[in-house]
Amino acid sequence: MSQIFKPSTNTLARVTLFGALFFALVSVWILVSLNRSAYATRQTIVRMQPVPFSHDHHTEAMGISCLYCHTSAEDSAFAGVPPTATCMNCHKLIWNDSPMLEPVRASFRSGEPIQWARVHDLPDFVYFNHSIHIAKGVGCVTCHGRVDKMPLMKQAVSLQMEWCLECHRAPQDFVRPRSEIYNMEWEAEDQAALGAKLVEQYDIQSMMSCSVCHR
C-alpha cells in the first residue's frame, strides 16, 4: 500500500508547529511592549491644555507651595484642581492683560471652570486616596516626578499596577519624613535604615490585597 503523505509532510508539520509557537510568543511580546509603551500609558506625553501652565515657573522660580493650589491634597482622596479665583489672586495684578491668560480671565468673569485635561488619570476601577499616601510619607516626587522642573505638565511614571505594587510590596524603599513630602530635591542618606524606621513610626503596612485598590 502506498503512503498517503509524502516524507516531506513531517517536516512541514514541524515547521508549522514551531512557526505557530514563534508567532504566538512574538505576539505576546508585542502586546506586552505596547502595554508598557507611552502609547498606552501616556507617560512623558505632554497634554494640550487650555492654558500652558508651567509648574517650573510657579514652583521653582516663584516658590509657590504645592498646597497653595492643591488645597485638598492632605485631607481628601483627590489633590484638587485650583479654582480660577486662586489663579486670579496673583494674575489680577501681574500679567493681567496677557492674551495667553484670557481663558483664565474669561473663566473668572463667567464663573465657568477651566476644562483642564487631566494628566494623572487612573482607570475608574482603581481607587486611590491622595491623603493617605501623604500621611504615610509618600512624597510628591515619588508619583509625579520632578514637577518643579516641568515647563508643561506630563506624567512621569507609568501608573500601571506593577508600578504601584513596587511601593506596596516594599514601602520602606520609598517613604520619607512627612516634613519632606513637598521637597522635590530631598534624598535620604540611608533609605534602608530610614525607611524601616518610618514604616514602624507611621504604621505603614504592605497592602497587597486586591480590595485595597479595586473596590
Image (cartoon, helix red, strand yellow):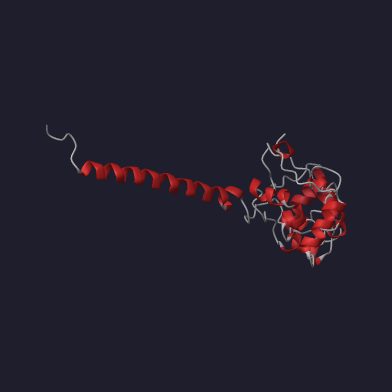
Which image quadrant for residue 123?
top right
Q: Position of residue 82 (x, y in %)?
A: 81, 48
- Could you tell me how many numbered marks the image carries? 0
Q: Position of residue 94 (x, y in %)?
A: 84, 61
Residue in the image at 79% along x and 65% along y: 188
Residue 15 versus residue 108: which sits nearer the camera?
Answer: 15
Q: Quadrant of the C terminus?
A: top right
Residue 208 versus residue 51: which sits nearer the camera?
Answer: 208
Q: Position of residue 61 (x, y in %)?
A: 80, 66
Residue in the image at 39% along x and 44% along y: 21
User: Can you see residue 174?
Assistant: no
Residue 105 versus residue 62: which sits nearer the camera?
Answer: 62
In the depicted structure, whether residue 63 falls above or below residue 37: below
For this orientation, the residue located farthest to the front is: 1
Q: Quadrant of the N terminus?
A: top left
Which image quadrant for residue 65?
bottom right
In the depicted structure, whether residue 155 falls above or below residue 60: above
Residue in the image at 77% along x and 51% along y: 104
User: Can you see residue 148?
Assistant: yes
For this orientation, the residue located farthest to the top is: 1
Does 64 sit left or right of 50 as displayed? right
